[in-house]
Image: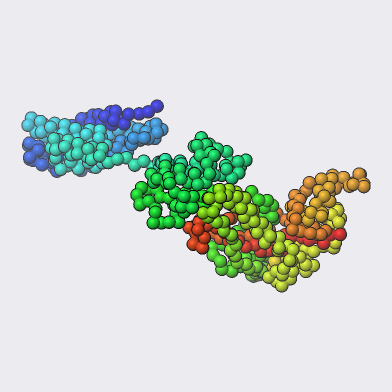
Amino acid sequence: MKFSKSILMLVVGAAIAASMFLLSADAFAAPLAHVSAAHVAGHDVLTSLIYQATPALVALRAEHSDLVARAAAKLASVKDGMTPDEIRAIETEHADLLRQVTAKAEEIRTAESASPSPTPADSTRAAIDAERARSGEIIALAIRHGMPADFASQHIAAGISLDKVRGLVLDAVAARSATPPLNPRVEILQDEGDTIRAAVEVAIQHRANPASVQLDDAARQWRGMSLLEMGRAFVEQTTGQRMRGLGRMELATRLLNLDTGLRSGGGMMSTSDFPNILANVVAKRLRNAYETAPQHWKKLARQSNAPDFKSRAVMQLSNLPQFKKVQEGGEYSHAALADSAEQYALSTYGRIVAITRQTLINDDLGAFDRLPMLLGRAAAETEASLFWSIILTNAAMGDGTALFHANHGNLGTGAAIDVAALNAGRAAMRKQKGFAAKAADADPLNLTPAYLVVSPDKETEAQQFLATTLYPQEGAKVNPFAGSMTQITEARLTGNAWYLFADPATIDTIEYAYLEGEEGLFTEQRLGFEIDGVEVKGRLDFAAKAIDWRGMYKNPGV
């Protein structure tokens, strides 16, 4: 149910005015102490009446005036657009204030009846009635038009005439109407040039790889055109330039914006928009190929971001020492933390795809699909190669010991993938301990393997083992590892070695990082300098480093 703010204010204004009429002439005389004699006749008589009021009556009248002002302010808080529940809550609070106004008026009447006061003359009574009417009308105007809470009380006390108050209210309403309301919604408008640009991009993507991109209605208008024809039509439609009568080489030069002297000086668009379209098509294909490349190695690692290219140290934090029993009257012993640090820094990797005049003239669509796809896939493979090289090289950790080493408790005796070998690996991971200042204080980490990593040579063996509930030769025995781990096969691994990895959410294993704000493959473009065309660069700021050996286990296999 919606409420009308104006009707609500009129009703409440009437209620406040009615409460004022409950007061006798003497009760209303107190607020007239500041009323100008020019506006109220018989001012001297009123003043004498005010001075005869008792302190209790003065206090009651002040409280009454305060309640009236609070009621007006509460009503003024009703705003357009409020929900019915919000308006009802204000109504409830306002009704309570009105009840207090009425009750206070009754208290004043009771106090007046108990206190003898001279009977005012008829002229004085008329002046009081006139002032009462002026005050009630000012209050009603303030409420009806949403004036500030203290508007009515200030102008009543100042003795401002009713006509002048009406003028002030009208001026305030006019100024308020001239101010446009704030609209928090932001509308993003797309002009015709944006629509055409998007349609051309889709059309080029579809020509380069019809299976991956479907034509929409806007792009279908560009179907069957060569790159030069698309560029010519695009520039003519968006800039109004005439591109007819140009040779193929001259047209390609103009479309790629290589002759800046011929660029249009008018309009919001220029021929530089077409090179941007071509570069966007290449960049999208690069990123798409990068994102769809297999990256199962990320399941074994934890991502971090680096703010710069400086060497950063990642700490292997120890477990907290055990609590020591404190004897009565004894002292608490200090706890100490032990840690180890691994360091690495980001490196930059990248390649460039060029879109030249020859690309347009030859209508070479491979520059928009095949080459970007290969480079995007190469970016993903670069990350994977850096990750798996950590496993293959078995480089030394910060303590000077190889990643997989007997001293780290994560290198087993060569064996096939069977229950006994998996049990030995799992037990070794469970027994790994946290770092502590004292070896006796180190707690077991109780890690369990979540991934079984093998080379293609061991892929079938691993699949059979994890999928078999019973022993192959002994059907009465159960395989406890069946379905307990996820298998990952990596072609960069060779031979019979196999690995166990804990979930990187439970402990650091290998950490990989990107430059903060440029995660993954980042693309940018520029007008070529060494070549006649546009260059699109794919860049990776990436690094990977083994942080903790305790979540990894290697068996050389047989």
Colour scheme in the image? rainbow
- Name the residue: 91% across, 44% down: 475
- Name the residue: 34% across, 42% down: 182
Q: Is residue 202 left or right of residue 449?
A: left
How many marks do you count on the picture?
A: 0
> Where residue 490 sits in the image (x, y, percent)?
74, 55
> Where residue 145 sits in the image (x, y, percent)?
25, 35
Compared to residue 2, the image places residue 373 above or below, namely below
Q: Residue furthest top?
A: 1
Q: Is residue 387 left or right of residue 21?
A: right
> Where residue 489 sits in the image (x, y, percent)?
76, 53
The image quarter in which residue 350 lies = bottom right
| Camera-side residue of 419 and 48 | 419
| Camera-side residue of 354 and 546 | 354
- Name the residue: 34% across, 35% down: 80
Q: Is residue 283 visible?
A: no
Q: Residue furthest bottom?
A: 400
- Name the residue: 67% across, 52% down: 295
| Camera-side residue of 290 and 68 | 290
> Where residue 504 sits in the image (x, y, percent)?
68, 56
Q: Quadrant of the C terminus?
A: bottom right
Q: Is residue 287 left or right of residue 15?
A: right
Q: Is residue 193 visible?
A: yes
The image quarter in which residue 39 lies = top left
Q: Is residue 159 left or right of residue 106?
A: left
Q: Quadrant of the N terminus?
A: top left
